[in-house]
Amino acid sequence: MVVFNVEGSYFKIQKKYLIDLKNGINFFSQMFSSKMRPAERDSTGAFIIKQVDPKLFGFMMFFLENNKVPQNISNTERGLLISVSDQFNLERLNKELKETDFSRKQIEHMLKHRKTPLQIISCYLLGIDLKDIIFSQDSNLSKSCFSCSNFSGSTIKNCNLNECDFSSSNLQRCDFSGSSLDQINFNGVKIQGANLSHCSLDGIDFEEF
């Protein structure tokens, strides 16, 4: 059994999960299956891991033991875990984290065939290309992650976009008129020419633009 001390939180995991090369060569397999000298230990003998959020580290341990991403992970945590999985060179975890819940083709199909407004709530759509898409009015996309996506020229009128993450996305010439955009993450967006008329914009810091 291997024990890690991550910012004061302790995690136990069997060594076999750390050197299982089905998950590829990574920080842990190098640390425990080679002659590389491990990290420093604390007074209990646990390996010290610094500058990592314990909750995110726990998600990594879960993946190594179960070969799947935890179901209880939020979109925000998912984005942060991508960075941490890069740090520890966990390529399979990184790949799974970047898989999106829907493709452009699936969304186009739903918009074409659904008779009711679209419901895409708390979904993960990192980097999706939705350029020039016309969403049905009253669609609910709230709490979804659209970070690094392309919405240029799209129409998303009178929709619920509360608490969505659009960070680093292209929103140029996007028509949001009449939509609810409360607590949106607009960090690093391109928003030139976007229509925000009659939108609810509570919690947005426009100094970021």
Image (cartoon, rainbow, N blue to C red):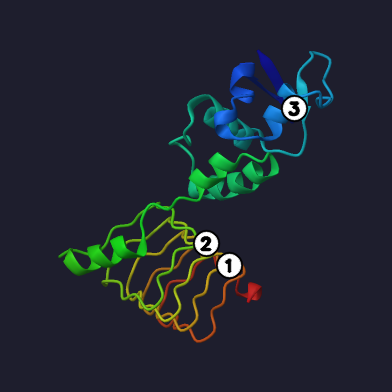
In terms of secondary structure, where does tag 1 sit? loop
User: Of label 2 and label 3, which has the lower sequence position?
Assistant: 3
Residue at image position (76%, 24%) is 34
Cα separation between marks 1 and 3: 35 Å
Q: Earlier in the sequence, mark 1 or mark 2?
A: 2
Circles 1 and 2: CB distance less than 8 Å?
A: yes
The dot on residue 147 is: 2
Is the residue marked by circle 2 packed among few (<14), some (14-19), or many (20+) residues within 10 Å? many
Q: Amino acid at mark 3?
A: Met
Residue 71 in the image: state x and y as whole percent. Answer: 43, 36
- Return the residue at label 3: 31
Q: Position of residue 33 (x, y in %)?
A: 71, 22
Q: Report the amino acid beneath label 1.
A: Ser
Image disc number at residue 168:
1
Q: Nearer the viewer, mark 2 or mark 3?
A: 3
Q: Amino acid at mark 2?
A: Ser
Compared across the picture, whether 203 is left or right of 47 comes to: left
* Mark 1 neighbour density, 10 Å: few (under 14) some (14–19) many (20 or more): some
Quadrant in the rendering for residue 116 = bottom left
Q: Position of residue 82 (x, y in %)?
A: 59, 47
User: Extreme left residue here?
Assistant: 115
Q: Secondary structure at mark 2?
A: loop
Q: Is residue 13 visible?
A: no
Q: Earlier in the sequence, mark 1 or mark 3?
A: 3
Q: Is residue 146 above or below residue 153?
A: above
The image quadrant where one finds the N terminus is top right
Residue in the foreground of this view, choosing between 171 and 85? 85
Callouts 1 and 3 close, C-beta under 8 Å? no
